[in-house]
Image: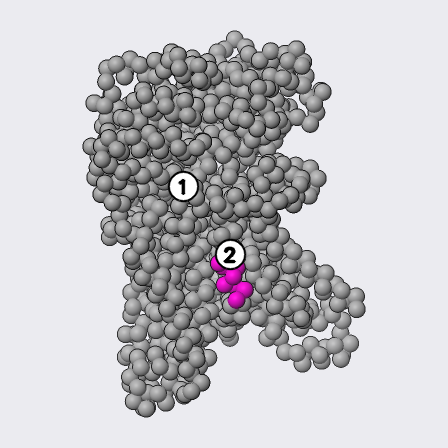
Amino acid sequence: MTGRAPRRRVLRALAALPLAGLAGACSAPQAPPPADAIVFRHPKLFGDPQPLDTLVGLFGRAHGVRVRRETLPASSDEQHLFYAINLRARSRAFDVLALDTIWVAEFARAGWLRDLSHAISASDRADLFHAPLASVSWEARQYALPWFADAGLLYYRADLLAAQGLAAPRTWTDLVDAVRRVKRVRPDLHGFVWQGKQYEGLVCNALEFIWGHGGDLDRPAEPAVRGLAFMRALVTAGVTPPFVTTLTEEPARVLFGRGKALFLRNWPYAWRLLERSGSPLQRRVGVCPLPHASGHATASALGGWHLGVNAFSERAAIAERLAAFLAAAPAQKALALAYGYSPPRRSLYADPELAAAQPFLASIGTVIETARPRPVSPYYVALSQTLQSEFSAVLAGVRTPSEALAAIARERRALASP
Amino acid sequence: MIRRLGTWLGLAAACAWSLAPFAWQVLTSVKPQAELESLPPLLPSTITLVHYEAVFAGHPFAHLLLNSFAVAACATALALALGSLAGFALAKLRPPGRAATLAAVVVLSMLPPVATVSPLFLLAGAAGLRDTLTGLALVYAGFALPLAVWLMAQFFRSVPDDLYIAARVDGCSLLGAFGKVMLPLAVPGLTATGLLVFVFCWNEFLFALTLTSSTAARTVPVGIALFPGIHEVPWGEIAAASVVATAPLVLLAAVFQRRVLDGLTAGAVKG
Amino acid sequence: MSARRLRPDAWALMAPALLVLAAVTALPTGYVVWLSLNERALFRAEDFVGLGHYLRLAGDARFWNALGNTLYFAAVSVALELALGLAIALLLARAGRARAFAYGAVLVPWAVPTVVSARIWEWIYNPELGVLGYLAGTPVNWLGDPVLALHAAIAMDVWKSTPFVALLLLAGLQGVPRDLLRAAAVDGAGAWTTFRRITLPMLAPVILVAAVFRTIDALRVFDAVYVLTGGGPANATETLSIYAYRVLFQMLDFGYGSALAVAMLAIAGIAALAYARLLRGGME
């Protein structure tokens, strides 16, 4: 019997460990957020959180509420997964949601977003760009407030092009020629990097190739086939490195930012990171609209974020006010000054202070205004599953453009007929 | 002599293969940011802890660690309590139909998690347990129970029947005999089982991703998989977070090496 | 005291465990089968559709692709894990003084959380900054090429899971009677002959058990590959679990997603049946 005493002590110690956890679990982290806090979910900021905190703090003091910011996961697909899981379960864990431009129709039809039509005044409607406003609309009602807008841009190494006596490319042929010319003197350089991983970003890139060749998912396939064939040919011709199939926005930007590539397709955010102090490319980068096939027009995919209010929120009234506050012109201007976020309002591109502080932003107003939305549909995410895998298959060379487009057309028909 | 040398070389290779990837992550976590953006250098010029600071300052990572610990501890406690009772009953009381019960337990342990995640999502929502640590702990305990029952049955089987019968003859109640005589003898088995269950809970991703949403209930694997970073690739921070998430397990495995080995092999080899 | 009098209590002791098991595993399993017979998607009227989803499954190229990926992933990774695991087990058995260290080292991949191991390998495979491309001397598109990517995922799984196999086999090795090996040595049998004629046959049951455990685990692989590649490129690494999860929670189609989940159940069931058969065979 005596031999058991120490054993029992061990046992007790062992039992105490989980029990301590049990006590911790039941007391500490489970408490719901205090009633006076509203939760704002948004994608990670690319920069110091201070300016947004100041803005949000301003609102909180004016209305006597506490606002807690929570960051969304990294990629658009993971973010959608997060919202879909939680809104399907009627979660109240967040009140104000930042929404990717492609989700509003789906969430609105599902009844997850409050109708915010009344929060957009007539003067707002006149001021906002058309495409962002269209993408927050579902059956003629607005379910989110346009927050900022994105569009695909071409970044190029102005120094290297100038050394060859080349101007910024206007057509895809110009770009391919420029890569060939520069590679002759700089064989170590990658030509043109963009976003080719199987994810939402690839859909934007592929649609830009299709649109820039005069194609469209809605119209006969011939120009679209040329667009996708061109995308694949970029890799086979050595203009784009094969590992483009792993690149998302930031790895591509880092690669270009280290001086390893001649051209980069990316969103406006990249400009500030390429031009910030310490960047090896400071004052050596140029930006222009995306090239197009000759005889066609440039076309950028519309990106960007909107602010919606969770339909299940218990603090909807104040959440609505926060969304309206953050999406109003003064807050958008502050965010544009601090983060270089491109606002979706015409008036701000004419704002002298903004133009002086962010000349780059002022210069891309037209690109943003004319950017084309991806299909606006409650079924977009389901369609995107097919778009992502088909475009990825074309890019990897395991499927021809016409096969992919046929599969996409089939899926669109299946989604249209419930 | 040559054979001996071969053994040593082989062992060295096996250890290197096992350790190198994690070691590389450790190195990555202490490299200055500038050196992460090019290769070479392989080794950091100076050791920096900025990535660790960033993980704890910029994200609710400490909270996730606490959640993970709480969920894993609760689930382990529950699985051990229920598993040892059931394992004891199966091994020592030999009820009729115990073979079928054990077989059912084994089959349940083979369920693919993705097959039950959608019903559990709906059920947890209906029961108000979604996005709570309690709900997650219950699910984990349920998924770890087959392993716990099976292992504890194995361990109890190796305790002689006489001790239990003697206790009952001495007038101990059933639970008394279980608690005072059998359980203390099964401490090694409990430790081994507890370790395996704890590791399972600490690592679980699918249910944590689906059944939780707020920082208040998220666990570490979800935090690492969904590391925010839409416009920066925080390789250094991911590495630091990985090291922090793994260190407790590596430590546990090192301290309780013997027990872990017992647990890993008991079910399969004796079975 | 007769044994019979003790029996009725047995079910009372097992009841709590069985109750939790029923609630968390058995009940949802029944529910998922029911869901798979129903329409339960966003924007669609709820409706009983019988085997409709299974008919759709049969014609769904993405399902067959995911099934193929899953089977290939399981077959290759388990084969490699068994081979490597056996080699490591044989080495560990002769580790002598280095034993504690070697065991500890081999346990490290086992202790690394799956999600973390995916992050570790994602970084190692990075096309520009990855150490593997650096060691290879030329950048390799590990995760961006459809053929390489699946094998890169397999290599990660082999790294993570070989320790389990090795330690299992090591325990089995320790069950091989020393006398038998000594006798073989006295008879002049070489190392290879001893291994093939004595060690391997004695080890066969343990190898089978390890194979089945690992196969069942590999067939349901989710987090490792989901975090490493997300299923791309060109769906080359999309496993059944990933596809089912996408349909369930990205598209919120609980009907068709549940049919995919039931297909996974069926596959796990076949593997479990094989396991039961083996166990019975092993005991006879």
Seen at 22% across and 35% down, the residue is A64
- The boundaries of the magenta stretch are B247-255
Q: CA distance from mark 1 to mark 2?
A: 31 Å
Image coordinates for residue B22, horizontal then vertical, percent? 58, 52
Image coordinates for residue C245, horizontal then vertical, percent? 40, 44
- Secondary structure found at label 2: helix
Query: What type is the residue that disc 2 sits on?
Result: Ala
Quadrant of the frame with the C terminus of chain A: top left
Taking A289 as reference, is C56 above or below it? below
Nearest the camera: A26 or A176?
A26
The residue pinned by badge 2 equals B247
On what subunit does the disc labeled 2 rest? B
Q: Main secondary structure of the magenta part?
A: helix
For the residues tagged 1 and 2, is the chain the same? no
How many C-alpha atoms fall within 10 Å of the one at disc 1: few (<14), some, or many (≥20)? some
The reply to whether residue A278 is visible in this rendering is yes
Answer left or right for C152 relative to C62.
Answer: right
Numbered mark located on residue A236 in the image: none
Quadrant of the frame with the N terminus of chain A: bottom left
Numbered mark located on residue C246 in the image: 1
- Count of number-bearing discs: 2
Seen at 58% across and 71% down, the residue is C172
The reply to whether residue A379 is visible in this rendering is no
Image coordinates for residue A346, horizontal then vertical, percent? 35, 13
| Residue at the limit of the structure toward the right, as seen here | B1
Q: Is residue A244 rendered magenta in the image?
A: no
